[in-house]
Image (cartoon, rainbow, N blue to C red):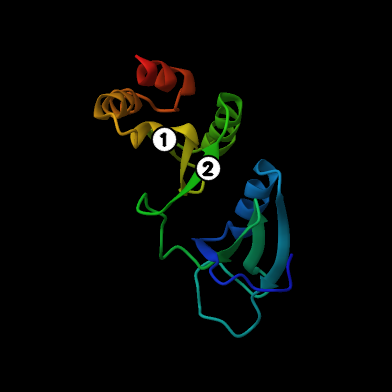
Amino acid sequence: MNDKIQKITTNLWFNTEAEEAARYYTSIFRNSKIGTITRYGKERHKIDGLTEGDVMTIRFQLEGQEFVALNGGPQFKFTEAISFIVNCETQEELDYFWQKLSEGGDEKAQVCGWLKDRYGVSWQIVPIALNDMLTDPNPEKSERVMQALLQMKKININVLKDVYEE
């Protein structure tokens, strides 16, 4: 990893799965790597289930973006209020990320390209072209795209393009 610390780094709070999650995410994204692992010592907050020698934090990168995963105990859970957007160029790429990130996740949370992974982290798997379609100056086109999008779990780029071009 870079010796230079990124100005803003996303921190993900896990109960005890920080290393497992970091390794899972880095196995999905091509331009990824694991960095420094910090372990709990004798001096720490008394947190249920974590002991001396357990992973405290693990730094990792996904597509050049730095993250820190923290084993902090069960106090906090992920919500849909924060999500990560994966911009995809093709349906094949979109299908790949959807399949990998939704595996073991909450199927009830799948709507309009959003999914929740096995750790409860929310992701938006979207085609790059969607932004242009939704911001088209022709409101009829953008409304048709939005109407089609609202009917989807995993996004189908061809369906969106078809309704856009009607």
- Specify whether residue 113 is in view: no
Residue drawn at (72%, 55%) of the image: 33
Kind of residue at badge 1? Asp
Task: Tell me if residue 65 comes above or below residue 38 in the rendering.
Answer: above
Residue 22 percent across, percent down from the top left: 63, 54
Residue position for label 2 = 86
Residue 54 quadrant:
bottom right
Of 48 and 5, the residue lying toward us: 5
Of 13 and 65, the residue lying toward us: 65
Residue drawn at (66%, 60%) of the image: 60
Q: Is residue 157 left or right of residue 42?
A: left
- Check disc 1 and report its element: helix, strand or loop: helix
Residue drawn at (62%, 48%) of the image: 25
Quadrant for the N terminus in the image:
bottom right
Kind of residue at badge 2? Val
Of 165 and 99, the residue lying toward us: 165
The numbered disc on residue 132 is 1
Residue drawn at (33%, 26%) of the image: 145
Q: CA distance from mark 2 to mark 1?
A: 16 Å
Mark 2 or mark 1, which has the lower sequence index?
2
Of 135 and 55, the residue lying toward us: 135
